[in-house]
Every structure is written in C-alpha cells, then in structure tokens.
C-alpha cells in the first residue's frame, strides 16, 4: 500500500478527472474512479432525484448514500459538507436550511471546487460557499457547524481518526453529523486491499465496520446510530482486474461483506462551569 501522501495525490488526480466528466461517464465506473466496469451503473450511489434541492448538474454519481436525507437539518442551520464535489449534497442541504441558513462545502480538489462554485453562482445561491481544503485540517473555525454531512468520502482519507477529531472541533456543542461511508465486515483479498484503483474507487480504503464505529465513540460522540445500511456487490468484471476465477469464487463465497452505512452521532453539550464531568471526580 502506498503512503498517506501518495494515496491523497492519487485521489486528487482521479477526482480532478471526474470533475470534468458527466454523471453518465462516472456511473460506468466503480465509484466514479475510472471506466473499470462494463455494467453501466454506479455500484454504490443512491437516487437523489426525489429530494428537494437536487440539481442534476451537481450530481456526479459519486456517493454511497443519502446523508442529507437523514441529517435532521433545520431552518437557519449552518451545515458543512465534507468532500462536497460538484455541490450535490450542499444544494440539498441548502433547501433544508432555507435562506437564513448557511452551507459550506469543503473539497481538496481544485477542479471540483471550481465546478461547484459555478453551479452555485448560476443559481444565485449566495448562502452556499465552497472552500478548498483538507478535511483533516478544515478551513473552518471551531464550533461553527450545527450539522456536518459527508457522502462516501472518509473512506478515501487515510487518517480517519484525524477527520473525526476535526468534526468534533468544528461542530457546535450539541451539533451532530450524518455521514454515508463504505465499511467492511471481514478482510478483503490482498490484491483488492492493496490496489490503488480500488482505493480511489472507495473500496480498499474502507476499514472494518466495528473499527469505524469505534473511532466515532473514541472521539467522544454520543448517540451513535446507523440510520441506513446496504450491501455493496462488486461486479465480476471489476473483480477480474484483481482476482483470477478461483479468487473471485472464493471472495464471493467467503465471509467478507462490503457495506454502505449512514451513521448519525452527536457532539456532547458543553459541561456547565463548575460541574464535574462523569468519572473525573472518582
């Protein structure tokens, strides 16, 4: 497996290419990472078209869930979208926040930021902005977000613990997140686990489901809830790039599961001045 910086650069290059493609091209690929499947559909994305605020120009078919549908966004909220791409989730979130709210999209691919800004400007969305930056070091002050959403992005980040720490920093006390991501149950075959293309395609960068949920809890979030879960099936023609026939058969008959999960969790309210947090006075 490559270093963290090499993986980040791989993702940056791939998603810069994707920013210049249309949804149909991206949907013929594994999570939009390149034309690696002859089956013309995206193996992970959900249908956004029925959600208010949906804009086809901003939908590149790169997600693995519908986090904004579950995010409990209220009028006037400040929402941050991690890995905002062409702006799809940000624009759906704007519909929920209303004109009195604010939406900030963060993406570290310049081409995506440019595309998202154009999408916002042509629609006159003055309360939606897009900032270039790393979600491990968000270009946002502490305690500013009521809600954080993200769609199939954390699996692309090597340091997932660092992202959850940043989420905790940026959320207001009592704020919450709803994040869709890819997780594993069981171990991927070695050839899949170390494949750079499968990393950019949202699979080999995924970690174990229990480890993922454990990182959320370890970073102090409460009321951790799986809002939606679905199995992801990788087509044989994608697997054939990395496994022989026997390997494909063993993988499909084994105990490894690849899942899209949408996870909700809350940042605790601040402890009142003079009060002792649980356990600190023992």
Image (tube, rainbow, N blue to C red):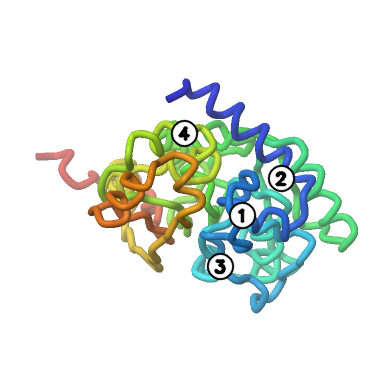
Which of marks 1 and 3 precedes in the sequence? 3
| Residue 199 pos. (x, y %) | 49, 38
**Which numbered mark, 4 or 3, is in the foreground of this view?**
4
Q: Secondary structure at mark 4?
A: loop
115 relative position to 190: left or right: right
Q: Which residue is mark 4?
A: 195
156 relative position to 277: left or right: right
Residue 13's place in the image compared with 146, above or below, is above
Q: Which residue is mark 2?
A: 18
Q: What's the CA distance linking mark 4 and mark 2?
A: 19 Å
Q: Quadrant of the N terminus?
A: top left
Q: Residue at x 18, y 39 (%)?
A: 280
Residue, far right = 122
* Label 1 close to label 2 by CB (< 8 Å): yes
Q: Which residue is mark 3?
A: 46
Residue 144's place in the image compared with 253, above or below, is above
């Amino acid at each position: 497996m490559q270093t963290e910086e090499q993986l980040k650069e791989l993702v940056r290059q791939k998603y810069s290419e994707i920013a210049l493609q249309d949804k149909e091209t991206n949907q013929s690929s594994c999570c939009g990472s390149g034309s690696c499947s002859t089956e013309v559909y995206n193996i992970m994305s959900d249908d956004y078209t029925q959600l208010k605020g949906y804009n086809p120009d901003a939908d590149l078919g790169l997600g693995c869930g519908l986090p904004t549908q579950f995010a409990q966004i209220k009028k006037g909220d400040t929402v941050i979208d991690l890995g905002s791409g062409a702006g799809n989730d940000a624009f759906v979130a704007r519909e929920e926040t209303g004109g009195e709210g604010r939406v900030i999209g963060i993406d570290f691919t310049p081409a995506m930021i440019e595309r998202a800004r154009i999408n916002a400007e042509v629609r006159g969305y003055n309360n939606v902005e897009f900032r270039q930056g790393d979600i491990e070091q968000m270009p946002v002050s502490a305690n500013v977000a009521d809600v954080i959403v993200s769609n199939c992005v954390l699996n692309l980040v090597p340091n997932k613990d660092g992202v959850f720490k940043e989420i905790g920093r940026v959320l207001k006390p009592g704020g919450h997140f709803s994040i869709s991501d890819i997780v594993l149950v069981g171990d991927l075959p070695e050839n899949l686990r170390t494949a750079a293309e499968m990393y950019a395609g949202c699979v080999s960068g995924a970690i174990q489901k229990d480890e993922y949920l454990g990182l959320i809890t370890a970073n102090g979030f409460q009321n951790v809830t799986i809002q939606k879960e679905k199995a992801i099936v990788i087509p044989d023609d994608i697997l054939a790039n990395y496994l022989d026939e026997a390997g494909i058969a063993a993988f499909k008959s084994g105990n490894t599961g690849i899942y899209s999960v949408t996870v909700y969790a809350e940042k605790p309210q601040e402890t009142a001045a003079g009060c002792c947090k649980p356990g600190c006075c023992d």
